[in-house]
Image: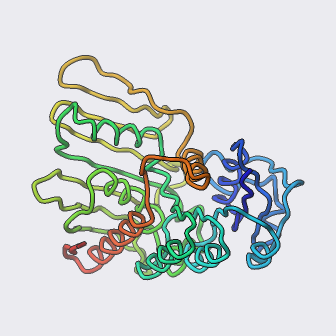
């Protein structure tokens, strides 16, 4: 039985708690949040995405306010780190040095230097480090990767990805709004698609980004073209200034030589395949969501099971580097080489 601790008990900490509780070979032994009220406020919703709402029973869980105390007192096998982004690197390194496997939320850090520090700590400790790029595990996106890699419909000609949220409204005044703590919209929201672009096509040669800026100079909306010499044409758009009534949406459109693949998370989310010949179909996808499936993968890694490579710390670092280049491109008004 894997003994698990969760550091940070806001929306994402509750999401991880829900996923860990569903694992048959794992048990949440401890929680830690600097705000003790976050752990006592067990019936309040902490986000606008389904899965982290509802009553939480913590009667069998030891609650801490200090991560150092939790790591010292509890004999943990693994931790989920779901704190604000600027705290990711130090807490990850600390847990790894204590001999604990780490699942750290995305983005891995606010700078490539901190990301490299985390990787080196994992290598030195011999423990697993996984960054929570859950879109790689999201059933519709995972199926898209399978279809593209399978090659039955030829090479990809164009691919576009979109991700919109109302975070600027729902998290106004919180740490999300402070780019020095969250990395801003590019690192917190848009990086999901940046990472999936890398997952599908590898590292781009360069990025060309355009952005809408907030009065304070932050980026509220971005549009990026990822340069792949010889193709495909790949773009991604993201923004978190949508109105609350619009809410959240993620979608993609992938044009291959012999088919079009599309997905939208709207009211009736459906992955659709439109072949050049034959009937339109809805490819069969795996059950669950990206949050639960990434934790299943992490559990197998911790248990030493053989798993296909879906994500690595190096790839998470690469996504951080691409996102940083996108942010620089948008602000400087020119294309930025990634390699």
Image location (x, y in percent) of residue 160: 28, 49
Where 55 falls versus 274 (above or below)? below
Using the image as rendered, state which of residue 212 and residue 140 is in the foreground: 140
Is 48 placed left or right of 151 in the picture?
right
Farthest residue in the right direction? 59
Using the image as rendered, state which of residue 221 and residue 291 is in the foreground: 291
Is 306 placed left or right of 73 in the picture?
left
Please tell me which residue is depicted at 32% across the width and 69% down the height of the picture. 322
Image location (x, y in percent) of residue 162: 36, 51
Using the image as rendered, state which of residue 103 and residue 197 is in the foreground: 103
Is 112 placed left or right of 182 in the picture?
left
Farthest residue in the left direction? 230
Please tell me which residue is depicted at 40% across the width and 67% down the height of the picture. 314
Where 35 falls versus 312 (above or below)? below
Please tell me which residue is depicted at 26% across the width and 75% down the height of the picture. 329
Image location (x, y in percent) of residue 34: 76, 75
Image location (x, y in percent) of residue 151: 22, 36
Quadrant the C terminus occupies: bottom left
Where 310 falls versus 211 (above or below)? above
């Amino acid at each position: 039985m894997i003994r698990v601790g969760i550091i940070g008990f806001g929306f994402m900490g509750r999401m991880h708690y829900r996923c860990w509780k569903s694992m048959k070979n794992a048990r949440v032994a401890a929680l830690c949040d600097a705000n003790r009220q976050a752990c006592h406020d067990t019936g309040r919703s902490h986000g606008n995405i389904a899965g982290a709402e509802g009553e939480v029973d913590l009667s069998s869980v030891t609650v801490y306010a200090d991560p150092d105390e939790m790591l010292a007192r509890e004999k943990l096998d693994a931790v989920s780190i779901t704190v604000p982004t600027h705290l990711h690197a130090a807490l990850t390194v600390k847990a790894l040095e204590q001999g604990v496997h780490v699942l750290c939320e995305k983005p891995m850090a606010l700078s490539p230097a901190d990301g490299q520090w985390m990787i080196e700590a994992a290598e030195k400790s011999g423990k697993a480090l996984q960054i929570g790029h859950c879109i790689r595990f999201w059933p519709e996106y995972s199926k898209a990767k399978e279809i593209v890699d399978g090659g039955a419909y030829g090479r990809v000609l164009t691919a576009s990805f979109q991700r919109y949220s109302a975070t600027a409204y729902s998290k106004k005044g919180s740490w999300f709004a402070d780019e020095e703590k969250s990395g801003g919209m590019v690192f917190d929201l848009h990086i999901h698609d940046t990472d999936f672009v890398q997952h599908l096509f590898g590292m781009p040669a360069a990025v060309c980004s355009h952005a809408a800026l907030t009065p304070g100079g932050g980026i509220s909306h971005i549009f990026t073209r990822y340069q792949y010499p010889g193709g495909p044409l790949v773009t991604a758009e993201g923004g978190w200034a949508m109105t609350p009534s619009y809410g959240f949406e993620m979608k993609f459109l992938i044009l291959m030589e012999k088919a079009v693949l599309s997905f939208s998370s709207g009211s009736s989310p459906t992955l659709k395949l439109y072949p050049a010949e034959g009937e339109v179909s809805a490819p069969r996808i795996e059950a669950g969501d990206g949050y639960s499936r990434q934790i299943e993968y992490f559990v197998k890694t911790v248990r030493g099971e053989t798993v296909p490579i879906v994500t690595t710390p190096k790839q998470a670092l690469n996504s951080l580097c691409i996102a940083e280049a996108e942010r620089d491109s948008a602000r400087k008004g020119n294309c930025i080489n990634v390699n």
